[in-house]
Amino acid sequence: MTAAPARILETQALTARYGHVQALSAADIHVCAGELVAVLGPNGAGKSTLLRAILGLASTTGTASFHGTPLPRQDPVAVSSRGVVLVPEGRGIFGPMTVSENLQLGAYRLRSDKAEYERRLTRVLALFPRLGERLSQTAGSMSGGEQQMLAIGRALMSDPKILLLDEPSLGLAPRVIAEIMEKLALLRDEGLPILLVEQKAPAALKLAQRAYVLVLGRIVACLDPRDLSSHDDLAKYYFH
Ligand SMILES: Nc1ncnc2c1ncn2[C@@H]1O[C@H](COP(=O)(O)OP(=O)(O)O)[C@@H](O)[C@H]1O
Ligand SMILES: [Mg+2]
């Protein structure tokens, strides 16, 4: 018998509220070594809240564990120090700063370890050569797709142990989405586990090992993307 793959990230009965509004109800999800896991759901389903809850940024009950140890609550720096890193919705890059400066910010904890900085930068620029051509350009002057690449590149500069992505496809053309998804698959294949939150199901389902469906704050299904014969299968969860 082969051992079950190790659960890198796991939530148990993770619940989040904004005041009296419960935006996430008792969510149980997990990401194993080598996996890219998708969380799909319509606008307002609680996808961003789930990521905020994992990071300990929302008012939560239940647990979010990383390698079997609960992640701290209300201490995002401590969470990111453990290697749990978010690429936020809307990308969160600094538009007036250059591409190079944005990437440096991702590695701020390195301080003066120049060799390690160069190693990380080389890896990011190998993955996204277009960023290398634009290092001295301001981030805000780049296309939406390039800005998303920069947001992912900046997260990689912190040497994450798992990457959480909040709707990286938002506002991008299908060709650009496909390119970004390809890069995520490469990262996953290099051994970086990924939790990908998306409203656009088809792009995410192409690369996910598992997909959770989140509707009105509840995980209503956990699917193997290979079992979905058509996207109508998904729609039934959205509109039940
Ligand atoms: N800061 C907030 N204060 C109050 N309600 C919020 C806040 N952020 C999100 N919500 C509500 O929580 C629910 C889930 O939101 P969100 O996690 O942003 O959904 P999604 O990312 O799936 O679009 C929505 O009903 C939204 O209106
Ligand atoms: Mg959201």
Image: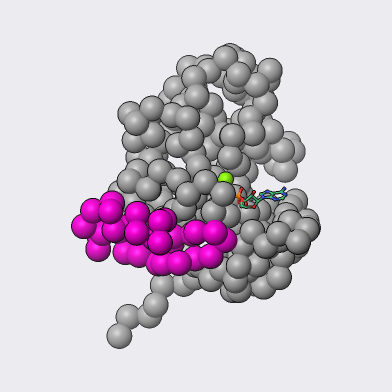
Q: Residue at x 44, y 22 (%)?
A: 130
Quarter of the image for residue 51 reads bottom right
Q: Is residue 226 above or below residue 1?
A: above
Measured as percent of width and height from the top left, residue 239 is found at 40, 56
**Given the current orientation, which residue lies at the most extreme front position?**
240
In the depicted view, which residue is nearer to us: 133 or 7?
Answer: 7
Range covered by the magenta-colored residues: 211-240
In the depicted view, which residue is nearer to us: 217 or 30?
Answer: 217
Measured as percent of width and height from the top left, residue 190 is found at 40, 50
**Given the current orientation, which residue lies at the most extreme left position?**
229
Residue 214 covered by magenta stretch: yes
**Given the current orientation, which residue lies at the most extreme bottom position?**
1
Q: Is residue 17 left or right of residue 11?
A: right
Q: Residue at x 28, y 53 (%)?
A: 232
Residue 127 covered by magenta stretch: no
Q: Residue at x 40, y 61 (%)?
A: 240
Q: Is residue 57 left or right of residue 36?
A: right
